[in-house]
Amino acid sequence: MDRIQAKGYMNQLLLIKDDPHGHFIGELLEIITEPKKPWRGKLKIKYIVKLGEPSVSEVISTPVYKENEIVEFAGNKLAPLSLAKLPESYDHSHANVIADRLAAIFKEQKELQVEENQLLVYLKNENLDRLLHSAANENHEHIPYVFYESGSRYLLIDEHETTLDLADCPFEFKWRGKKKDMLGYYVGEGIFRSHDGEEYRPSEGETIYIDKKQFDPYFILQNELDPSSLDLFEATLKDYHIDHKDLIDCHNSLLLQLLQSNGQKSFKGVNFLTYRTHTGQIIVQHHYERTLNEDASDHVFDRYEFTSDNGKRSVVTYVSNISNKPT
């Protein structure tokens, strides 16, 4: 919009396209002109039309301009208003913008889900689903850590300066052997032992690797389960014609409790697992209880409640020591 055209909109509403901060509607209060400079408009903010772009942190910020705030904008950011009906208020316009964006997201999700189901059916029909799963498993990403010794402590530090204390560390590690890569566990005193019994003492500054999958909450959950409980869980998954590869979401609340335990010995809660195949969706509620005992076997209770979208339900329970289960 040029300044001549803008004079016809004095004290009227204009569209403000202030990307990346968003789009607004404001009342034109003043036209500012200076020699050899582009004209500017002084406007009072009335409504929001579009939210600003998310920041690098992926957190949506509140609008940069508030209701009735007076702001100067370059003339090339202003345009005539084409809305047939104005919102009731600034807050209504704010809510409408969010509602419109959510509606667009829901539409995109529905379209993506339809495409996902079509692809799953295609993979099944072409007998490619197992091959795809195998290819994904062969492409694990290993995170490099540098080995350090600090007094009596042995540490691994990654590129982000995140420190991992090796004491009681349960991860499987990979290191470069003389002839091949070795896999094994940390056994203490700065020593790693491979699966075939070969011990390795890295020098300070050497690189040790951890498969990224070991930080995955679902992988951690499977490894936390008692082998008999895991067998029961997997057998029921099979009854529903699903596999671990069909997981689409895992909420591992037990992991969160363990990370924040600070010496706590008892844990109780529910994990939520969601699986999807080309035939439907299954939700598993994993109710768990754990009591850690120093002088006896730990008490373990797992109850798996399966529910499919076609109404099929199953409940299976594993108890390590029935006599210790609370009543």
Image (spheres, grey):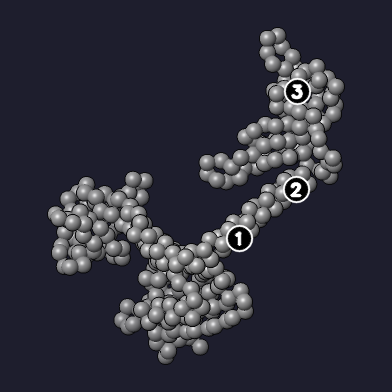
Counting residues from the start of the chain, the first of labels 3 and 1 encountered is: 3
Give the label, 1 or 2, closer to the camera.
1
Does residue 23 sit above or below 210 in this rendering?
Answer: above
Label drawn at residue 114: 1
Give the CA separation, mark 1 to mark 2.
27 Å
At a point 64% along the width and 39% down the height, the residue shown is 52
Q: Is residue 310 left or right of residue 202?
A: right
Q: Nearer the viewer, residue 28 or 168?
A: 28
Quarter where residue 220 is shown? bottom left
Amino acid type of the residue that numbered disc 3 sits on in the rendered structure: Met
Image position, residue 285 (x, y; %): 53, 74
Secondary element under disc 2, as helix, strand or loop, is helix
Counting residues from the start of the chain, the first of labels 3 and 2 encountered is: 3
What residue does disc 2 label?
A: 96
Question: How crowded is the residue under tag 1: few (<14 C-alpha within 10 Å), some, or many (20+)?
Answer: few
Label drawn at residue 1: 3
Amino acid type of the residue that numbered disc 2 sits on in the rendered structure: Asn
At a point 36% along the width and 46% down the height, the residue shown is 160
Amino acid type of the residue that numbered disc 1 sits on in the rendered structure: Val
At a point 73% along the width and 40% down the height, the residue shown is 49
